[in-house]
Image: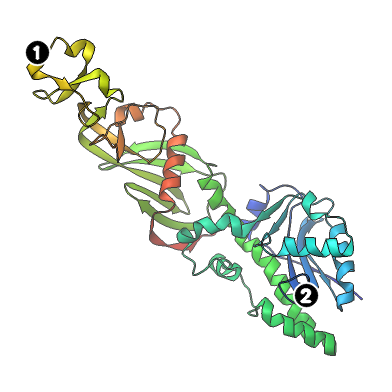
Amino acid sequence: MMQIHKFPVETPPSFDKIANTLPEGFCLFDIETTGLSPGRSYLYLIGMLKKECGSWQLTQWFCESPLDEKHAIGSFADALPEASCLIHFNGRSFDLPYLKHKCVYYGIADFLSLIPELDLYSVLRPYRSLLSVSSMKQQDLEQLAGSPRTDDKSGKELIGVYREYLRTADNRFLEMLLRHNREDVAGMAWILPLLTLDRLFQGEFKVLDMTKQEKTVTLSLQTDHPLPVSFSCSQSGFCLSVRADSLTLSAERFDGTLKYFFPDYRNYYYLPDEDTAVHKSIGRYVERGHRIQATQKNCYQKKSGSYVLLPPGYACSLPVFGQNHRMEPSWCLYDDFSEISDFKSYAHAALQYVRTGKQEASKKWTDI
């Protein structure tokens, strides 16, 4: 007969803060099976963490035999009608397709396709270099988050434990199985605050102010929820610094002379004596010996000033300057830049660029 176990779960403060930003009724879940192939293995345990009556409760459906598999899936489905989002770790690769295959086999309606889902692994994988973890396994991220996990067995090792339980009905084996699943599900609660990292790079931030320093221009950013990790990373003139009490994005500043290149060079003359280009409507008054047809490389006018570095690919609405016609790197005048009322699009482009850069400081989990 299938067993149902319930445990209260104490979540970290950082989880409670991020939970308030997620769809009401969301839950975390994980499954345990006797193999990877749903056609040649059995599901023996489902764990789900959900808020009930103001506190977080873990429900576990445990199969005392393979005959309980259908009942466990059906009971899990019955507990989900009000759930607005299923959160899992790498469930798109295993948990969800495994359960859907079993639903087809047992003739159970596909309830999983009706509920939005969020895969923590898929969301956080692009930030592996920032997090400096040895791998993107769940237990590595839990360790970063300071999870008090005690179970050290793998899902593969537990297959033998489940078989021993089926043979002996020894509750010591049952406790090992329940604890592993319980800590898998509870561990996701420790990882969940890292979603704020993804939100930052997706553009969920505000630019508070801009300061001009000796060699940089620094933008102070603010997110709705503090980031749970501290780190610094940089890439070709840009640096992002994340601390418990500050979030800054710095861009290189250049004082000197750069060139503005006219795109329609065929309509310009280049004046070698003055090292500048002029439109033909004006250049026709210059003696022929002092003008030549402009090319992409010399169709420019020089300007001296203080410049701010632009991230590659940024669609700047301001005049853009460079050292050559390739415009790599490209710059805009600081005085023009400071007149922009909204720096967010610039900061967003810079964050996307710096994300893949070199990490300068070891990651550190902060108490938020």
Relative to 186, 7 lies left or right = right
Residue 81 horizontal/vertical position (percent): 85, 52
Q: Residue at x 37, y 49 (%)?
A: 239
Specify the quadrant that holds the N terminus: bottom right
Relative to 123, 26 lies left or right = right
Relative to 248, 301 lies left or right = left
User: Label 2 is placed on what type of residue?
Assistant: Arg
232 vs 358, nearest the viewer: 358
Name the residue tied to disc 2. 40
Residue 356 horizontal/vertical position (percent): 43, 53
Relative to 269, 143 lies left or right = right
User: Label 1 is placed on what type of residue?
Assistant: Glu
Q: Quadrant of residue 148?
A: bottom right
Mark yes or no: residue 56 visible: no
Mark linked to residue 287: 1
Q: Quadrant of residue 31?
A: bottom right
> Is 254 rendered above or below residue 71?
above
Q: Residue at x 68, y 76 (%)?
A: 155
Q: Residue at x 45, y 60 (%)?
A: 129
Q: Quadrant of residue 107?
A: bottom right
Specify the quadrant that holds the C terminus: bottom right
* Farthest-out residue, right: 1
Q: Earlier in the sequence, mark 1 or mark 2?
A: 2
Q: Residues within 10 Å of mark 1 (few under 14, many from 20)?
A: few
* Farthest-out residue, bottom: 168
Q: Residues within 10 Å of mark 2 (few under 14, many from 20)?
A: few
Find numbered disc 1 in the image and state the secondary structure of the residue it sits on.
Answer: loop
> Is 192 rendered above or below residue 153?
above
265 vs 6, nearest the viewer: 265
